[in-house]
Amino acid sequence: MTTYVEYEYGKSKMPFDTAIAIAEAFDISLDEMAGRGASALREFAPIPLLDVRAGAGGARENEDAPEVLKHLGLSRDWLRARGIAEKAVYAIQIAGDSMEGPPAHLHDGEMLFVDTGRREFGGDGVYVLRAGGGLLVKRLIRNFDGSIMVRSDNPDYPPQVVKGKAAQFDIVGVPFTRTGDIR
C-alpha cells in the first residue's frame, strides 16, 4: 500500500510539511484541502469511494450494491476541463499486481477514480472491465486485424486476444488518478 493511499484511508497521518507541499502543488489553501469553508466545499465534487476492488490479475467479484466508505473531493474545475461529469465518477481500489509494470504502474491497494461516462473503446489505453461477474483493470490494444488484446502491464501475465463482437467483457469506464489520466 502506498503512503498516499494510507493517507486517503486514514491509516497514516500526513506530516504537516507534506500537506503544505500538496496544497502548494494544487494551488489551494490548507483550509480548502481540509474541506473547511463553504466556498471550498462548492469547489470540490464529492466522489464516492465504494467498497469495491477491481482485479489487477483475475476478476474480483463485488457486491451488487457496494457500500460507500466515504466521499473524496475532486476539483470541479479539474473535472470540467477534462469533460468528466462528476455524477459519472466513483472511486475503487485495485487488488493484485498485474498492472504494476510500466507504463501504468498501478499497485495493489491503490485507489482509482473511474469515469463511467466513457464505456466504449476509445483507443488503446487502460480500462475498468466487467468480465465473468467481476471487475478487472486492464490495458486494451486494438490489433491490425481488428481484434482487441487484453494486456497486463506486468510481463508475468500473458495477454489475451478477443476477436469479433462477442467480447467476453464490458467496459465499465476509464480509470484516472488525482494527478490525471493513466497511460
Image: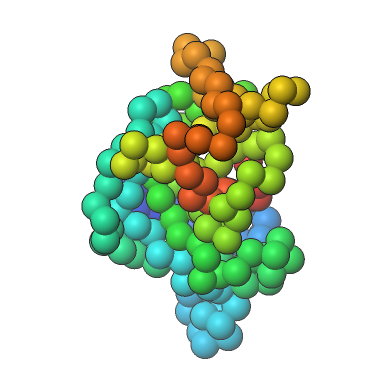
Query: Where residue 20 sits: x, y (%)?
Result: 58, 58
- Position of residue 23 in the picture relative to residue 143 (left or right): left
Task: Give me the residue at 45% from left, 34% from top.
Answer: 168
- Residue drawn at x 69%, y 46% is 122
Q: Foreground residue, 147 or 86?
A: 147
The count of marks equals 0
Is 177 in front, or is 174? 174
Say which quadrant the N terminus sits in: top left
State the quadrant of the C terminus.
top right
In the rendering, at what x and y percent does residue 157 appear? 47, 15
The quarter of the displayed image where residue 26 is located: bottom right
One can see residue 1 in this view: no
Which residue is found at the position 30% from the left and 53% from the top? 51
Q: Is residue 11 above or below residue 107?
A: below
Give the vertical position of 87 relative to 180 (above or below).
Answer: below
Residue 82 vertical placement versus 155 (above, below)? below
Q: Where residue 125 sits: x, y (%)?
A: 65, 37
Q: Nearer the viewer, residue 55 or 148?
A: 148
User: Does residue 138 show up?
Assistant: yes
Q: Is residue 152 left or right of residue 148?
A: left
Residue at the spot x=63%, y=44% of the render? 121
Which residue, as the protein is rendered here, is positioned at the far bottom?
38
Seen from the viewer's position, the closer of residues 141 and 178 is: 141
The picture places residue 175, in percent across and down from the top left corner, at 55, 47
